Amino acid sequence: MLAFIIRRLIYGFFVLFGVLTLVFFIFNILPGDPARMMLGQRADQDAIDEINRELGLDKSILYQYALYLNDLSPVSYHSSNALDGSFYEGSKYGGSTFFQADAFSLVVKAPYLRKSYQSKKDVSSILFESLPETAVLALASIAIASILGILLGVLSALYQDRWVDKILLLLATSGMALPSFFVGIIFAWLFGYVWSDWTGLNMSGSLYEVDDLGRGEYVNWSNLVLPALTLGIRPLSVVLQLSRNSMLEVLSMDYVRTARAKGLTTRSTLFNHALKNALNPVVTTISGMFASLMAGAVFVEIIFSWKGIGWEIVNALEKYDLPIVMGAVLIIAVIFVVVNILVDIFYGVLDPRVRV
């Protein structure tokens, strides 16, 4: 088991290394001048050159890549060379030096995602402020998809080829075919505008809002309903079909037929013998979907003005604030890899054949 976990961790490390390499080179070949974005269009050349030296943009692309890896590494190298001192200033990391020599030092720190071109704030602080809202939205969506998807999938399997089954399959197919941004616009218009007097919902709004009466910030859970439903429709459709197919496969097995032949009730056969075995592939799929929802909430957050990571990504792209975009992509990649590794380990504990 330990060897299996180590293999998954090594695999996850190489995936993340590949992602950050692609992110760096893709965003560094895009046209644009970060120094001018930070200083404004009327900045003089001396100030622009100073910013480029501070960011390491006057160096070769490979040298910049090495600096980027140094920023992200939990153990960073700091040169004592005066030419590099401005960029390798350890104080910007907030780490602690554990090895000091005449020419260099090694610093233990958290990964440094650099600073925003526009606000000059640390990218990590910007993204971690918005991460909880995206996490809440993804959790609510996957909860809706899991509970309703499994229940409707079991119901569809029990009434196979009847009108209930056909209607549920039609709805599931429609849910997978409709794009999230289209569903979001329709939901916002219908439930947040046309029927708002009955639903009490708003067309847009975030989890945290500021009270107009000056009582400060408060949590508005009603704003979560429409974006969570919108984001959860596609995974709900997938879980419904997967639950139905898995349940039909389990119900056709010999041990289920034997349980029925012994006189067990349909309810006892379903819950004590069939359901727990049918849910194994469903649970694995749901776990992977959660990581995907963390990354796929961009359109939904924009439509409903939900101030999560997707909202920050779009705003950063509009302002050419590349450090925020790069940091957001890396955080999403880390979440995706960590969740999948945990799912693999959990599945390896349940089924020893996976470890082979």
Image (cartoon, rainbow, N blue to C red):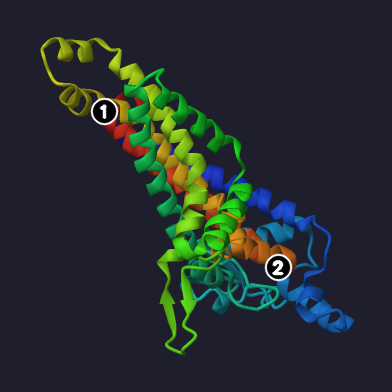
Residue at point 42%, 35% (across, down): 239
Q: Which mark is residue 321?
A: 2
Q: Callout 2: 10 Å neighbours few (<14), some, many (20+)?
A: many
Q: Is residue 129 visible?
A: yes
Q: In the shown orientation, is residue 59 left or right of residue 122?
A: right
Q: At which x and y percent is residue 315? A: 67, 66
Residue at point 82%, 83% (across, down): 47
Q: Earlier in the sequence, mark 1 or mark 2?
A: 1
Q: In the shown orientation, is residue 166 left or right of residue 179?
A: left
**Mark 2 belongs to which amino acid?**
Asp
Residue located beneath label 1 in the image = 275
Q: Quadrant of the N terminus?
A: top left
Mark 1–mark 2 Cα distance, whole angstroms, equals 49 Å
- Element type where label 1 sits in the image: helix
| Residue 276 higher or lower than 87, as above or below | above
Residue at the extreme bottom of the image, as rendered: 214
Q: Quadrant of the C terminus?
A: top left
Q: Which mark is residue 2?
A: none
Q: At which x and y percent is residue 225? A: 45, 58
Q: In the shown orientation, is residue 24 left or right of residue 281?
A: right
Q: Nearer the viewer, residue 222 or 81?
A: 222
Residue at point 46%, 90% (across, down): 214
Q: Nearer the viewer, residue 153 or 348?
A: 153
**Mark 1 belongs to which amino acid?**
Leu
